[in-house]
Image (spheres, helix red, strand yellow):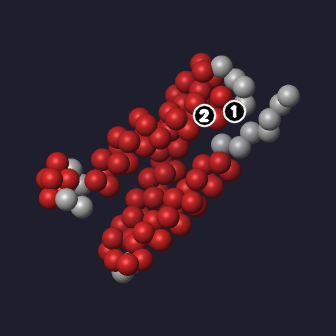
Amino acid sequence: MSLYATHTCPHPLPSQHTHSHPFCYFPVFFTMKTMIQGKPLSAAVEKYRAEIWDSCKALWSVWVPAQLVNFAFVPRHMRIPFGTCGQNRRGLHMNCRHHEAFTT
């Protein structure tokens, strides 16, 4: 991490979970999901509004403690594999949590 990045964002974990996930990741997730299902974009907006807080709480309840463990206890050379495993589990959880049967 560069010195510049350290000064511009001293706490990347809170800003990532309070800004980028709710306003970037989740809108893209719901939009892509509804596009794949062949539904209109308005369905993605409705789904986002209905489920944003539950999705954020689920993310925060798992990912924030995992990151705290990662940076407090995991050796430096194992942080990337630990984070990657966590991201894969989060993606699987999101897909299972928001799974709906496709109707044709």
Identify the disc placed on residue 66: none
Q: What is the x, y in percent for residue 38?
A: 72, 25
Secondary structure, mark 1, is helix
Pointers 1 and 2 in contact (CB under 8 A)? yes
Q: What is the spatial separation of the Cα atoms under label 1 and label 2, in whole angstroms? A: 6 Å
62 lies left or right of 17: right
Q: Nearer the viewer, residue 46 or 70?
A: 70
Quadrant for residue 18, please give it: top left
Given the current orientation, which residue lies at the most extreme front position?
2
Q: Amino acid at mark 1?
A: Ile
Quadrant for residue 73, please give it: bottom left
For image coordinates 65% across by 48% down, the residue present is 95
Q: Quadrant of the N terminus?
A: bottom left
Within 10 Å of the Cα at label 2, are there few (<14), some (14-19), or many (20+) other Cα atoms?
A: some
Secondary structure, mark 2, is helix
Q: How many marks?
A: 2
Q: What is the x, y in percent for residue 98?
A: 66, 43
> Which residue is disc 1 drawn over?
36
Within 10 Å of the Cα at label 1, are there few (<14), some (14-19), or many (20+) other Cα atoms?
A: few
Seen in the picture, residue 73 relative to 21 is either above or below; the reply is below
> Which residue is disc 2 drawn over?
32
For image coordinates 65% across by 19% down, the residue present is 40
Seen in the picture, residue 64 relative to 98 is either above or below; the reply is below
Q: Quadrant of the C terminus?
A: top right
Given the current orientation, which residue lies at the most extreme right position?
104
Q: What is the x, y in percent for residue 27?
A: 50, 33
Residue 51 visible here: no
Residue 95 visible here: yes
For image coordinates 47% across by 44% down, the residue present is 56
Q: Amino acid at mark 2?
A: Met
Seen in the picture, residue 9 relative to 19 is either above or below; the reply is below
